[in-house]
Image (cartoon, helix red, strand yellow):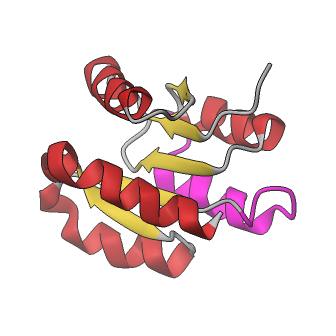
Amino acid sequence: MTTPDILLIEDSPSQALQFRLMLEQAGYHVQVAATGIEGWRAASVLQPRMILLDIDLPGLDGFQVLSRLKRDRATRHIPVVMLTHREHVSSVQRAIDLGADDYLFKDDAASALLPVVEQAMALA
């Protein structure tokens, strides 16, 4: 299996599809995980260049996944961009405190996804 450029951890099938298609049209190889546990395990095994991580996930939430990723020597170097809804503005600071490299409001994804991804990829 080839290493994906981006691991997208998103439990909404419609949003995951929307983000994946946008990223693939821009030339990125994307792997999708639908739960926090699945995403955390995939990150360890696949070692993607970056991770897009939803906050509201079943099982482990995005904060728990982020915390595990940043504590693990094998994954702490991978840039992580958190995905959140605009009403969760307080979550942004918590994500940054836990080690997120950036965040993206899902409402802005149509215009902001690719620039945010390109910036995070520059860190990888």
The N terminus is located in which quarter? top right
Q: Is residue 70 above or below residue 37?
A: below
Quarter of the image for residue 6 reads top right
In the rendered structure, the answer to whether residue 24 lies left or right of residue 88 reads right
- Residue at x 60%, y 69% (from the top left corner): 123
**Is 77 or 85 nearer to us in this picture?**
77
Taking depth in this image into account, of 7 and 61 the one nearest to the observer is 7
Q: How many marks?
A: 0
Quadrant including the C terminus: bottom right
Q: Quadrant of residue 10?
A: top left
Q: Residue furthest right?
A: 73
User: With respect to residue 57, does 115 lie above or below?
Assistant: below
Q: Position of residue 84 (x, y in %)?
A: 28, 53
Q: Is 60 contained in the magenta span?
A: yes
Image quarter for residue 68? bottom right
Residue at left offset 23%, top offset 55%? 112
Picture residue at 74% right of the left edge, 66% below the top: 77
Residue 11 against residue 117 in the figure, above or below: above
Residue 11 as seen in the image, left or right of residue 28? left
Residue drawn at x 45%, y 66% as measured from the top left: 119
Task: Tell me the magenta residue range.
Answer: 58-77
Q: Is residue 116 left or right of residue 4?
A: left
Q: Is residue 119 left or right of residue 114?
A: right
Q: Give 43 or 48, whichever is nearer the viewer.
A: 48
Estimate the x, y position of residue 99 in percent, counting from the top left.
57, 74
| Rendering coords of residue 43 (x, y %) | 71, 42
Check if residue 15 falls in the magenta segment: no
Q: Is residue 63 above or below residue 12?
A: below
